[in-house]
Each structure stands twice: as C-alpha cells, then as structure tokens.
Image (cartoon, coloured by chain):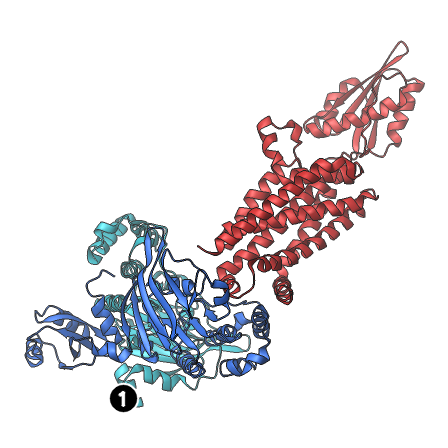
Chain colours: A cyan, B red, C blue
C-alpha cells in the first residue's frame, strides 16, 4: 500500500483571485505520521493553501488529495477525515468541557458509544477527569490548548491541520503542546502546522517555506540549515523570505 | 473647533463608505411610508354592495342612485332576501343593504360580512353616512373630522416617523460608538487630549444631520405622495421632530455607554426601543383601549408623546398651543436622557 | 528627574481575578524597555493604566512625574499609545487616518514628518489605500506613525509584533531602534521571548506579577542552572527517557535540541551510555547556554500553567 503512505499529495495547486495568484503551482507530498511545518511570511498564501487542503475553497487549477480524497470533488469526505485547530477559534468558551467534546464529536458524526469511549480515553490521557464540568473559559491556557487539540482529533482523523496553534502562549505551555503533537505523530497521525515561532519549525520533520505564492524551500530543518549554512531556522527563514515582493 | 470638524468629517466618511447601511437608512423610511400609505391600508375601497328593496319608492331610488355613483362602492344590483346569505357566504358581496318601506317610513338594515371586523365596521359606517345624508328624518349624524375619508395613510405617518427616528438615530449612534470601542479606536480618542464632550458632539452632529435628511425625505413623501394637507403647521412639525431626533440621539448615546459589542447595541436598541414603540406608543393600538397598567408604561415612551403631537399637527392641523403638554414632556425627557448618558459616558471612561 | 515611568505597588482586579498584583517598575528616560510575558500575563492591563485609560485599584503609576490618575490630561499629550490590536479606522485611507490623528492633537503632519519619516516612508506610495487593506506589517507601521504624530516623549507599544511574520517583526524592531536614537522612551511588550534581546532592559511578567527585571544579558547570566543540550535521532523518545532520569530536574525541547536542567552529579557521558543501552541512537549531550526562555521556564516551573 505505497499510495496510503502519502496522506497529503499536492500537484500544481493554484488559486487565483482575479488577476492575483494567491497560490502559484505548489507541489509537495506529506507522508503518514509526518510533522509538516508550513511556513511563510504574511500574505505568502499559506492561509489560502490551507483552506484548499481543508476542502473549504476550490483550487483554480492543479489537484490535491488529502487522506486519499480529492479536494476539488470530494470536499465533504476531506472534511470528515481531517481535524482542524486554530489559535483564534477552537472551543466554545461558554460551554463546559464535556459539552464541547460532545458537540464536536457529534459534528463529526460519531455515535453515542463512540463518543463515550473516545471521551473516556481523552479524559484519561489528558488527566482531565476532574474538569469535565468546568466551563472552558475558566480553564488555564495550557489545559485549554490540550483540550482543543484533543477535541480536534477526537474522530481520529488521518491528518490534523494546526493554524498557528501556539500564538501568544507562554514557553512552557508551547512546549507541552508540541509534546502532544509529537505523541500524535508517533501514533501515526499526520500533522500539518503553521507557526510564527521559528524555533518550533525545528521540531518539524520537514518544513516548507512559501514566498509569494510559491514554495521556495522544502526539506528537513537540518538539511535546510546545512544548505544555507546557518545555525537556526530563523536565519533560514530570513534568507528565503527576504526577497518577497508581495504585500497582502 | 478644528478637532470637532475633523471628528465630524471622519464620521461622514464612515457613513459614506458604508453604502449598504446608508441605503437601508434612507430606504427604510421611504418603504415603510409607502407600504403603510398604499399597500397596507385599513381604509375600505371598492365595497361590493347589493340591495334588497321590498317596495320601490322615490326615496329608495334616490338612495340606490347615491350608492351607485359613489366610487367607494360597487353596486352589484338588486337581489332577493333569500339570496342574502348566499352572496355574503360566497364572498360575492361585502354588504347587503335591505330597505323596507313600512307605510311611508323607510327602514334600512345593513348586513355586512364581519369576517374582518374592522372592514365590516368601516363598511357599515360608510353606508350609514351615505344613507343618513339622504334621509332627513334620520336622528344620528356621523362626521369623521380631520380625516373625512378615513384615509389610513395619514394616520400612520406620525407613527412611522416616531418609530423611524428612534430606530435610526438610536441604533446608528449607539452602533457607531460601540464599534469604536470594539475596534479599540475609542481608546485612541480618549488617550488624545480631546475632551470627552467633543467626542460626543463629534458623534451626535453627523447623525443629527443624517436624521434631518431623513426627516426631509419623509415629509416630502407625506405631503406630496400621501397627500397630507399642507399648512403652516409644517414648521411646528419640523421643530417637534428636531426635538424628538435629539431625544433619540441621546437614547443611542445611553445605549452605547452600556453595550460592549455592536451586536448588544443593535439588539439592545431594537428590543428596548422598537417593541414598546410599536406596541405601546399608540402607533397601532389605541392607548385608551389598553389596560391601565400599560397606559402608565406608555407614558414613559417618548414615541407616544411625539406621535400624539404629530397627529395633532399633521392630521388635526392644530397649532402649537395644543401640544404644550407633549412638548414639555419630550423636552424634559431629552434633558434627562442627555444628562444621564453624558454622565454614564464620563464614568464609563475609567473603570 | 531621570525616571520616565515609575510604578509603585500597583494592583488591578477584574472582579475576583487579579490582573496585576503589586507591580513595581522603574523605566529610565530614553530607555528601550521590554515587558515580556505570555498572553493573559497582565501586559495590556498595565498598558491601559499607563495610558490613563484604566484606574488602578491600588498603588500608583506616574510617567515623567505626572500621575496617571490625577494628571491624566497633561499626560495624554506626552504619550503615544499603540494598543494591542490594530486600532485604526479600517474604512479610512492611510492619509485620512494620519490626518485625523494629527488633527486630534492639533498638529500638522509636516511638523512631525522628520520623526515619522523612517516609519511612514514605505506607506507613502499608497496614501489612498484603505487601512483595512494593508498587510499586517504595513498596518503596524501606520499605527506607529499615528502614535508618533504628536511627537510624544514616550511610546507605549502593546504587543506591536503579535501575528506579524518574522521579517516584518525584524523591520519593526529596526525602526524602533531608530526612534530610540531620537531620545524617545519606548516601552514595548511582547509575547515572543526571543525579542527580549532587542531591549536594553526587560521585565518578565506572568500572571500579573513581575518575575525579574534587568538587562537580558544579566538575567540570562543569572539563570544559574546547569544546562545541557541533548540531541538524538528520535527526539521524542529521547525526551521521555531523559525526563525519567533521577539526576535530571527538567528536560524540554529547545529548537533543534533538548535542554536538560541537570541536578548536581549529572554526568553527560554516563547519561549517554545509559540512553544507548536503551537503544537510542546518535546521542550527543553537551553544555548549553541558556536564554530568556530558559529563565522563564525556570521561574514558572513550579506553577500550574
């Protein structure tokens, strides 16, 4: 089953808005269980590309499959097989922990039995049994994040998209969050993540850097650093993205 | 002054740059006036009427002729008494006039379709009017003054004006202030050396001007298309409306000091203002028919007094001296609301 | 009087929640001072109090000797405040926004032009672009220009670089150092710990309390922990194996390596052997230099985040 190993496969994916080419013929594959860092300056086209991969926006040309479903024709199937979490919105603050879990698992079409076993597993693994009835807004930041990640992966998706999941979060919580990502990837989940923290790019198996709608660099952090002969991903990013001409 | 000027200019730019809202604010009064004026109307046109006459006399002929020529009626012709129920039931006629001549006295009976009671009542009143006009011996004379044809479009103009101003002024002012709170620009204004009073004026003046435009449009429609009688009371109408606009603006200011989000401001103004205005101001339901408790509540609704004053000025064509009570109440309400909202604005500045 | 900002025992409650508790802080005139802490640490509350927008519950704050509560009117002319979120009129153009803020303070753009030029020059190309249509980096430049228009003596910048990409962040900091040369005191807050090194002095803040104040170098040198780097082929397994070692106080990811906070008696060579026995490959453990993040982690280690 060689085909199954590519959880995301993108070929010449392009999105145009009028005369403006937001995403310009990008091509890449993401392997099963990989942590794939998707970097780029503001306005480079990251968000547009991610929206297409999540089945929220149709490409102008080119093709891509996510979890073996075609994003242009099987958008609904794609949505069923992915998880999504962003810093801005991930949980309903006014609902309790258990209500959030119930809500999201129902949205993903899980049966009551599945929800029961999945949420029991979730409480146990996150050590949150005592917090079931807490309102999400009263949880400390670190717990909120853990919960948001757990909820976005409750239906056991093939791939989870994380859109700047750690913005503004303190260093300790950020690190704990990345350990969750590591763990999920060990268990075979594919992680597709964007971030503004370039030290976090080091944690990824492979990193792509988008500049002006194109992918300008794609390799493991180690290889990229060697290629540009620098010590950190921060420097790599600056070298690659400095020629960007586009303002969004 | 220069600061106030640039605040106003900025606000005008906001309004102009948001064409959708502007179109709605201008269009809403126009649509409402035309809708109530022409489409939704409680006045009765085209009453289909048949008659049963047991003995034809000069009197009955005279009467039927009157009905035939009256353009409010469509005379279906003569019918027999046992057809009456069928005609009404099948909806072929709205009313049947039964005329009996007993010796020399003419007795009239009106049978009307009261599946719509308001209609039936109006129809009956019409017919009575026509009959009584012709029957000299009739003891009762009904005159409907000020609005002799009972045109409902007249009646609705004050109500709609009362609703539109409080809605548009209050909602637009409160939303525009709260939007600045939401976007954080209010903080920048407050951090600058301008006085809070200037900020308030910078908000109120542009929306006052916008309301004046709306007032102009509404009056144009009322006095031309809807045919409201033109007289010197127009000046009073304008003056009272301006007072009411200021009152509505203060209401918006007050809402903005309480609400934190544009949504709260919108729902707040709509629920607090719109429902009571529609239900309790006498715009639709006569205040005298309300339970005493609700009558008391209606006293604190500014729209009630405005609408009453407008009715007196626009429909009854009375002069200023008849609306002192309303003016005094509206004026005190304005002062109260204005000072309350300014106090709130100052105190909400610092938490 | 050399003190630009002086904060004494300042506290602020939101309901029962303590947003700031007993903050003491001094910022010298002409300093580039950083307030470093994660979201929810109380940075914005502190800024609002300094910007005279919020009243403290207890304690006091003064800027150039002017009390933020009593002398707020005089103070408002001296401060340039840039709030956390982009707070300009999105439906007005670049030029309209700038003109508007100039008129609020009763100044002319050309009188302050020399000051805003390094910031504003890139925006001049499109004066008629709506502010809402600008990119993140450009928005920040416009906001900074508007905050500078009345030649404030102190800039209060609340998280100016949040959500902005690394390149624009870099540019922004370079602009700030140019302003710093014009003798403007700059207070800047950020949740990016790596930006601490751009400041002359920093205060680290968490949960409404100040953890440490000092120059970044000084603070880092005071970490006083026995830090090591560790790398291996499977970093995640390495991390979990290191965590359970008794001689290790803490271990966490740090860019491309792991940082080990070692207790006394930790022997890198012995640890390496031990790990290799467990089947881990490519292990290398060597001394590490700490930075601000290490310090923050140390200072908050015993708190539930």
The quadrant of the image that shows the N terminus of chain A is bottom left
- In the rendering, at what x and y percent does residue A84 appear? 35, 63
Q: Which secondary structure, mark 1?
A: helix
Question: C92 or C195: nearer the eye?
Answer: C195
Relative height, residue B256 to residue B97 (above, below): below
Q: Please state if C10 lies on the left or on the right of B253 as rendered.
A: left
Residue name at image x 63 percent, y 47 percent: B248
Q: Please state if C168 lies on the left or on the right of A31 as rendered.
A: right
Residue name at image x 22 percent, y 58 percent: A126
Relative height, residue C247 to residue A126 (above, below): below
Relative height, residue C240 to residue B69 (above, below): below
Mark 1 sits on what residue? A226
Question: B121 or B161: nearer the eye?
Answer: B161
Q: Please state if A245 lies on the left or on the right of A103 as rendered.
A: right
The answer to whether any part of residue B74 appears in the image is yes
Q: Residue furthest top?
A: B103
- In the rendering, at what x and y percent does residue C2 appear? 38, 75
């Amino acid at each position: 089953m060689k085909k199954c190993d590519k959880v995301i496969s993108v070929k010449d994916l392009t999105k145009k808005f009028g005369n403006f080419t937001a995403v310009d013929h990008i091509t890449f594959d993401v392997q099963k269980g990989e942590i794939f860092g998707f970097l780029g300056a503001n306005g480079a086209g990251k968000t547009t590309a991610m929206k297409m991969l999540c089945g929220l926006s149709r490409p102008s040309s080119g093709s891509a499959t996510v979890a073996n479903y075609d994003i242009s024709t099987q958008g609904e199937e794609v949505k069923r097989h992915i998880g999504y979490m962003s810093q801005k919105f991930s949980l309903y603050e006014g609902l309790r922990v258990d209500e959030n879990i119930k809500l999201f698992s129902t949205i993903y079409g899980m049966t009551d039995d599945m929800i029961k076993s999945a949420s029991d597993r979730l409480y146990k693994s996150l050590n949150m049994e005592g917090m079931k009835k807490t309102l999400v807004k009263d949880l400390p930041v670190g717990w909120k994040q853990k919960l948001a990640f757990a909820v976005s992966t409750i239906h056991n998706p093939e791939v989870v998209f994380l859109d700047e999941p750690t913005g503004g979060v303190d260093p300790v919580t950020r690190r704990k969050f990345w350990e969750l990502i590591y763990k999920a990837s060990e268990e075979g989940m594919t992680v597709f993540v964007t971030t503004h923290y370039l030290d976090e790019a080091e944690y990824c198996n492979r990193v792509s850097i988008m500049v002006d709608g194109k992918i300008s660099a794609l390799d493991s952090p180690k290889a990229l650093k060697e290629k540009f002969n620098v010590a950190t991903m921060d420097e790599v990013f600056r070298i690659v993205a400095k020629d960007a001409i586009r303002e969004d | 002054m220069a600061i106030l000027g640039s605040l106003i200019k900025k606000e005008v730019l906001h309004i102009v740059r948001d064409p959708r809202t502007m179109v709605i604010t201008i269009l809403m009064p126009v649509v409402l006036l035309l809708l109530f004026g022409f489409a939704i109307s409680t006045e009765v046109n085209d009453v289909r009427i048949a008659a049963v006459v047991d003995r034809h006399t000069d009197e009955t002929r005279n009467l039927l002729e009157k009905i035939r020529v009256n353009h409010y009626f469509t005379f279906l012709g003569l019918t027999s008494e046992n057809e009456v129920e069928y005609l009404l039931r099948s909806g072929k006629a709205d009313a049947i006039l039964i005329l009996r001549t007993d010796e020399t006295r003419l007795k009239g009976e009106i049978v009307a379709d009261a599946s719509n009671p308001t209609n039936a009542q109006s129809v009956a009143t019409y017919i009575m009017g026509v009959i009584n006009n012709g029957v000299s011996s009739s003891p009762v004379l009904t005159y409907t003054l000020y609005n002799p044809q009972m045109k409902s479009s007249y009646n609705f103009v004050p109500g709609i004006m009362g609703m539109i101003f409080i809605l548009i002024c209050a909602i637009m002012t409160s939303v525009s202030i709260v939007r600045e709170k939401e976007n954080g620009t209010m903080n920048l204004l407050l951090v600058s050396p301008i006085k809070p009073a200037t900020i308030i004026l910078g908000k109120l003046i542009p929306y006052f001007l916008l309301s004046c435009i709306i007032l102009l449009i509404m009056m144009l429609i009322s006095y031309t298309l809807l045919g409201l009688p033109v007289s010197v009371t127009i000046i009073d109408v304008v003056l009272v409306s301006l007072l009411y606009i200021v009152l509505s603006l203060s209401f918006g200011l007050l809402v903005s000091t309480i609400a934190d989000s544009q949504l709260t401001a919108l729902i707040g103004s709509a629920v607090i203002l719109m429902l009571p205005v529609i239900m309790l101001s006498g715009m639709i339901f006569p205040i005298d028919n309300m339970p005493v408790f609700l009558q008391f509540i209606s006293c604190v609704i500014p729209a009630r007094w405005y609408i009453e004053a407008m009715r007196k000025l626009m429909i009854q064509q009375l002069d200023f001296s008849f609306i002192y009570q309303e003016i005094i109440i509206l004026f005190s309400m304005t002062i109260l609301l204005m000072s309350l909202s300014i106090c709130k604005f100052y105190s909400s500045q610092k938490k | 009087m050399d003190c630009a900002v002086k904060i004494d025992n300042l506290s602020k409650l939101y309901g029962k929640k303590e947003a700031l508790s007993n903050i003491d802080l001094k910022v010298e005139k002409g300093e580039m001072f950083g307030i470093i802490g994660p979201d929810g640490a109380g940075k914005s509350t502190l800024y609002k109090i300094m910007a005279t927008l919020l009243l403290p519950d207890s304690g006091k704050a003064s800027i150039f000797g002017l009390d933020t509560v009593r002398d707020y009117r005089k103070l408002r002319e001296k401060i340039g405040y840039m709030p956390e979120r982009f707070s300009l009129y999105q439906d007005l153009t670049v030029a309209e926004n700038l003109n508007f803020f100039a008129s609020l303070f009763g100044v002319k753009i050309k009188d302050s032009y020399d000051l805003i030029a390094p910031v504003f020059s890139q925006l001049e190309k499109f004066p008629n672009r709506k502010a809402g249509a600008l990119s993140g980096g450009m928005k920040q430049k416009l906001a900074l220009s508007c905050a500078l228009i009345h030649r404030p003596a102190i800039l209060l910048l609340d998280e100016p670089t949040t959500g902005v990409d690394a390149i624009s962040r870099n540019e922004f900091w370079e602009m700030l150092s140019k302003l710093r040369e014009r003798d403007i005191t700059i207070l800047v807050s950020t949740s990016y710990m790596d930006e601490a090194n751009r400041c002359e002095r920093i205060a680290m803040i968490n949960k409404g309390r100040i953890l440490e104040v000092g120059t970044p170098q000084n603070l880092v040198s005071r970490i006083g922990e026995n830090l090591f780097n560790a790398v291996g082929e499977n970093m995640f397994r390495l991390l979990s194996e290191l965590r359970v070692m008794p001689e290790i106080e803490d271990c966490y990811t740090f860019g491309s390596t792991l940082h080990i906070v070692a207790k006394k008696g930790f022997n890198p060579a012995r640890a390496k052997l031990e790990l290799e026995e467990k089947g881990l490959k490519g292990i290398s453990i060597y001394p590490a230099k700490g930075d601000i993040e290490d310090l923050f982690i140390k200072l908050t280690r015993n708190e539930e985040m």
